[in-house]
Every structure is written in structure tokens, then in C-alpha cells.
Image (cartoon, rainbow, N blue to C red):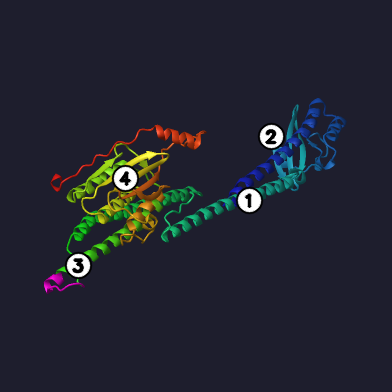
Amino acid sequence: MCTLVALAFLIPLGISLGERTREEAIADAARRSALVTGALAVSTEPPVVQRAVEASGDDPATRPVVHGLGGDDAAGRADGAALARAAADRRSVVTDVPGGVLRLDPVVLGDSVAVVEVFVPDATLDEGATGRWLLLAAVALALVGAAVLVVDRVAARTVDSTRGLVQAALAVGDGDLGVRVEPTGPRELAEAGYAFNRMADRLVAARTDERELVADLSHRLRTPLTVLRLDADGLDSDDTSVGSFTEAELDRRRAIRRIRQAIVTLEGEIDVLINTTRKAVAHEAGPAMCDVSEVVRDRMVFWSALAGDQNRPHRVSGAQLRIPAPVPRAELAAALDAVIGNVFRYTPQGTAFEVAVSRRDGYVAIRIDDAGPGIANPDRALARGASDQGSTGLGLDIAKRVALQANGSVSIDRARLGGASVVMLLADPEAVPRQVNRFGLVGRMARDAREPKAEGRRWTRRRPSDG
């Protein structure tokens, strides 16, 4: 296509240059003829005319020939009809003859008309045409080469863009929703690249929403399941190995055992489901933020009601103001439920507990204290699959995973209430970097000594009738 365009442009240009060469040759013949016609206007004497003819050119073959002065007209190349037409019309005539072109210029001499003939050979007409055609051919080749290079680069970009789009589509088909393409190439391919990226973004959002919904449903199931487990723990013993029982009593104890085992199995399945979906959501959706105070208040609505049913004094402190943390809201709610659930699971009914939120030294601290027997081996309790109470340890493992996700940690210590104190530390995203104190530890100790002691805690005991 580009070659045809170049030829369509250069061929008329070559023809135009050839016509210009012919016109220039005929114009030169007109100038030589003017020397002779000027001499004839002054004198018709043969010597004067002969000198003018010789002065018009060096080549005898192309010197002007004068017709109509009574001399020998046979020396010219013009036929009688052309001479008669020029004399009759009294205007210049250009006619083709074998070997070239003739220019006939009439000159009025009183009652007669003389005609000056100038011959222009083909060699003069075509002079320089070969060089011009060669130049045009070189230009044509250069244009064709440039067109080939341009087309090659455009084709390469098109192929690269198409290949990248195909590879990205195959990657998405294989499950890699994080792949994106750089929209390049022709406009249509670039628009296809933008459309592909939008499709991939919507797929990621749809799958994240789906997994978030599954995790939220699992979390909602675990809350009433905790109540069901606590109620099951309050049933009679399911031990049938010691003592003698009637057939009805055996059936009842076996039923209680099946209920407890089913609850344990269901709790494990829900925990696995929550962990799997939360991990996938966190990987695809990236970092998220939540209000720690809002999560604590929301979860304590449920646990306060359950604490009232079990006559457990409880208190929430520090959850009045907004305190951000770099973890998803549902993740933090699951960790909080796991730790508080351990308090209800491993301490007797009526045991007090406290949930406190604080913000200091670049961290957000969530502390859950209880007045139970405490944890004898905190390190073992924090390890997944190990617990002093015979459980799977999954509750503290959930809390530790959430804390590590927020660049924090989980620790267990002796609470002021006498039992266990589980502290979750989460990095404060709004913390200002602390400046180094030149007084160091001495200045810190002096400042801590000046701070007033915390006021004594007031506990509230709710009766089941309080709601």
C-alpha cells in the first residue's frame, strides 16, 4: 500500500519535470529565433542575416533557417504547409518533425512575410531527464524503505500488545486475578486493554465480596454457637464408664456427649472456614482499617447479655473515642470474640472480666482481664494447638494472627483481677514518630513517678433479669 502511494506521487512529478524540460528547450529556441527576427527587422541583407544566424548558436544543425527571403529554403526541415500556416496566421507555430521539434516564427517585411525556423533535437528535449528519473527512483526507494520500517514498528507494537493481552487473559483464566496489562498499540487494542483491566478489577471485587460474605456468615454462626456450647457445658455429665445407669439414663448421657462433640466439630469447621476466607480476602483486598472502639462496643453488646445470664461482673473502658487500627473490622471482631469466649469457657460462672482499650507509644492496646484461675504457661497457651485447658488453642492463635497482621503482638500476663490478662497490641497508623529523649530511661522513670495512680475500678453485677 505504501509503495503504491509513493509511486502515485512520484510518477506525476516525473512527468511534470519532463514537460518542464521540453518547455525550457522550446523557450531557448524562441530566444535564438528572436536574434534573427530582430536582425530582419533592421535589415534583410543576406550578410546581416547570416551574421545573426551564426550568432544564435554554435551547432550548425540547430541554427535558425530563414524562409521567404528568396534564398534556398531546402535547408530547412519544415514542410510547405507548416510554413504557409505560420505565415498566414502570423503567429508562432511549434510542430513535431522526425528527430525533434520545429519552432516557426513569422516576421512581417512590408508586403511579404518571412518565417524563421529553429530546430530543437530530441537530445536537447530529453537533456537531464534521465538524471531526474534516477533521482525520483532513489527518492521512491527511500520512501518505500521508510514505509517498511514504519509498518514494521507498528506491526511489532500491535503484535506485542496482542500477545500481552492474550497472556493476561490466560493468567486470569488460571486464577491469577492480580495480573494487569499496559494498554498500548492501536486505539482499538488500547481500549481492549483498559476494558480487560476493568474486568479484572471487578472480578477481584466480586470474589472479595463473596469471600467476605462467607466469612461474615461464619462469624455470625460462631456467636450463637458459643451460646450453645456454654449451654451444653451446663448439662449433666456424659460419662458412662463409672456407675450403673438405666437404659434411659445411658441414652440421655450419650445424647449429651453427641451434642458436645457435634458442637466441638462445628466450632472447628467454622474456625477453619473463617481463617481460610479471611486470609484470601486479606491477600486480595490489601490492608484495611477499622475503629477499635466501635468493634469493642459492638461485640460487648452480645457478651454483656451473656454475662448477665451468668452473673458475671464486667466493665468496658477506653472505648468512647475513635481509635483506628490497620486490620479489617471482621478480623478484629473474630479475635475479640475468641479471647472473650475463652473467658466464658475456662472460668466459672460469676467470674468478673474487663475489656479495656488504650492508645500509647505508637500502639493500640486491647486488654481482656478476668478474675479466674489464670494461665500457668502463657507461652504454651499462645502456641497453636496447645492449651492448658485441653482446647485446641485456636482462640489465642486467631488473636495472635490478627495482631501480627497489624504489626503488633499478643502477650499473656497476670491480671490485676487475679486471673489472666491477654493484651493485643496493634500498630497505631496515626502515631507520630517519637523523638529521642536525651535523658533516656531516667527521664522516663521520673515522668512515670509524677503520673497519678489509676483510680480503683468499680464493678457492676448484672442479674439475668436486667437483660
Separation of residues labelled 4 and 1 (CA atoms):
90 Å
Helix, strand or loop under label 4: loop
| The residue stretch that appears in magenta | 241-251
In the rendered structure, which amino acid carries the disc numbered 2?
Ala
Which mark, by number, is residue 447?
none
Separation of residues labelled 4 and 3 (CA atoms):
36 Å
Horizontal side of residue 335 vs 193, given as left or right: left
Which mark, by number, is residue 88?
2
In the rendered structure, which amino acid carries the disc numbered 3?
Asp
Separation of residues labelled 1 and 2 (CA atoms):
54 Å
- The residue located at (82%, 27%) in the rendering is 43
Determine if residue 312 is in view: yes
First-in-chain label (4 vs 2) = 2
Q: Is label 1 in contact with label 2 (beta carbons under 8 Å)?
A: no
Q: Which residue is mark 4?
A: 416
Q: Which residue is mark 1?
A: 144
Query: Residue 45, position in %: x, y?
Result: 85, 29
First-in-chain label (1 vs 2) = 2
- The residue located at (39%, 46%) in the rendering is 425
